[in-house]
Image: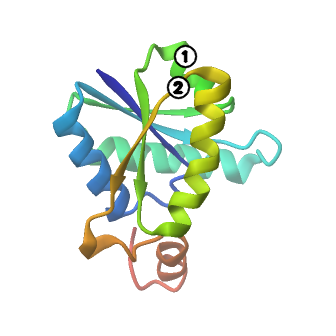
């Protein structure tokens, strides 16, 4: 079975890595898909996505189960076009669940696409891309 792990991954955090690593034990193929908002797509956004794709590819260079792509369409369309079985999402808290629930319902209702949730590792549930960006901005962490 193939699963899609979509997100902006701005940046790809240890929390994201934990979800991918766990998904690799459950699925034959994990496609990490960096979504690009085509309405906001500028040269800086293109460069960020390319840089993040290369970073993630380097992390999983020795894992043939992981593929990294970018996309500008609806996530459910990527699932259908690539013959992927379902979407996987990490859930840290009830706020994440409420946000994901709406998207999950739309993907299932309009596209017949299933979404599975993995609860965040309790040690990593406070990790967010927003915090990681701030730490990177001030030179506290590299990635």
Within 10 Å of disc 1 (Cα), the crowding (few <14, some 14-19, many 20+) is some
Estimate the spatial distance between the alpha carbons at disc 2 and disc 1, rounded to whole Å.
8 Å
In the image: residue 69, left or right of residue 61: right
Q: Which quarter of the figure has residue 32?
A: top left
Which secondary structure, mark 1?
helix
Q: Can residue 62 be seen in this view?
A: no
Tell me if I can see residue 48 in this picture: yes
Q: Image quarter for residue 105?
A: top right
Toward the viewer: 29 or 121?
A: 121
Which sits earlier in the primary sequence, circle 2 or circle 1? Answer: 1
Q: Which residue is drawn at 48% across and 50% down?
A: 52
The residue drawn where x is 45% and y is 13% is 83
Q: Marks 2 and 1: CB-CB under 8 Å?
A: yes
Image coords of residue 49 (percent x, y): 57, 46
| Position of residue 99 in the picture relative to residue 135 (left or right) | right
- x then y, percent, for residue 33: 49, 37
Seen at 76% across and 44% down, the residue is 41
Could you say whether the residue bearing mark 2 is in a helix, strand or loop? loop
Label 2 crowding class (10 Å Cα cut-off): few <14, some 14-19, many 20+?
Answer: many
**Total labels drawn:** 2
- Disc assigned to residue 68: none
> Vertical placement of 6 versus 27: above or below?
below
Where in the figure is residue 13, as x and y percent of width and height? 39, 63
Vertical relation: 92 (above or below) 21: below
Residue that badge 1 annotates: 80
Closest to the camera, between mark 2 and mark 1, is 2
The colour scheme used to paint the residues is rainbow
Which quadrant: the C terminus? Answer: bottom left
Q: The N terminus lies in which quarter of the figure?
A: top left
Where residue 113 is drawn, which disc sits there? Answer: 2
Q: Is residue 99 above or below residue 126?
A: above
Residue furthest toward the right? 39
């Amino acid at each position: 079975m193939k699963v899609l792990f979509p997100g902006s991954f701005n940046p790809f955090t240890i929390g994201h890595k934990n979800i991918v690593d766990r998904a690799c034990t459950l699925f034959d193929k994990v496609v990490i898909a960096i979504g690009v908002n085509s309405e906001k797509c500028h040269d800086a956004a293109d460069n960020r996505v390319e840089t993040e794709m290369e970073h993630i590819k380097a992390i999983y260079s020795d894992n043939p189960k992981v593929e990294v792509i970018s996309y500008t369409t609806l996530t459910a369309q990527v699932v259908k076009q690539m013959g992927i079985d379902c979407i996987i999402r990490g859930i840290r808290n009830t706020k994440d669940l409420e946000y994901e629930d709406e998207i999950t319902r739309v993907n299932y209702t309009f596209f017949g696409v299933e979404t599975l949730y993995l609860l965040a590792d309790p040690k990593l549930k406070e990790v967010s891309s927003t915090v990681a960006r701030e730490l990177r901005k001030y030179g506290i962490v590299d990635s």
